[in-house]
Image (spheres, rainbow, N blue to C red):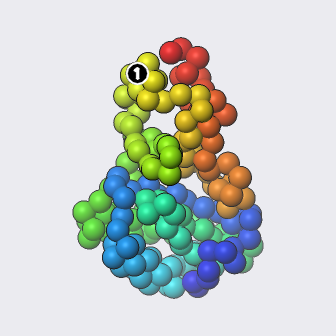
Amino acid sequence: MLTDFKQLPSSARIWIYQANQALNSEQIAAMQTDWETFLQTWQAHKQDLKAAVKCFYNRFWVVGVDENLNAASGCSIDKQVNFVKFLEQKYQISLLDRSQIAFLHQEQIFTIPFQELERAIQAGIITPETYVFNNSLTQKQELEKNWIQTVENSWLKRYFATA
């Protein structure tokens, strides 16, 4: 059962999918339609899931489920991941690559492969004040408060200490 992302409670469970490139308005509109079609029939144990999706920064798809109605199950999550793989093939993009870390600088998003992180810190590309996206969040309230953090307040600070 499809709902508006704004209507999801702050306790809603979320998944964040980061595209490997900025999406244009046509791609976003087409993918939004695909997502909505999927979410209208998405179920867990034959029970409808109250779900929503929203694209942020032309780069991130955030899917949310109001688990006060019905909780997502392992099988329903597998269906979601398989749907994301379908989107990757259809639109020739990557949405499941967790090795790319996204940063925000002057309203521009850039990514750095995890294995290049220390080099980027040493080169001054990443500083303690650089903003980073934390895509491991699991609740909408976290998205609203802690999705974008400075490096010094994120999980990346431990790499900075060794730079």
Q: Quadrant where the N terminus lies?
A: bottom right
Report how many numbered discs are placed on residues in the image. 1
User: In what element is the residue under mark 1?
Assistant: loop
In percent of width and height, residue 113 lies at: 37, 36
For badge 1, the amino acid type reads Ala
Residue 134 in the image: x percent, y percent? 57, 45
Residue 117 drawn above or below residue 58: above
Q: Is residue 6 above or below residue 15?
A: below
Residue 37: quarter of image: bottom left
The answer to whether 157 appears left or right of 25 in the picture is right
Give the residue pinned by disc 1: 123
Residue drawn where x is 43% and y is 77% of the image? 32
The x and y percentages for residue 130 are: 55, 36
Q: Is residue 77 visible?
A: no
User: Eyeballing the image, is 136 above or below 122?
Assistant: below
Whether residue 119 is situated above or below residue 31 in the rendered picture:
above
Q: Residues within 10 Å of mark 1 (few under 14, many from 20)?
A: few
Q: Residue at x 71, y 52 (%)?
A: 145
Coordinates of residue 123 in the picture (x, y in percent): 40, 21
| Outermost residue, top side | 162
Q: Say if residue 50 shows up in the picture.
A: yes
Q: Residue at image x 60%, y 33%?
A: 129
Is residue 15 or residue 118 the one in the foreground? 118
Instruction: Please state which of residues 120 and 54 is positioned toward the viewer in this rendering.
Output: 120
Residue at (34% x, 55% y) in the render = 21
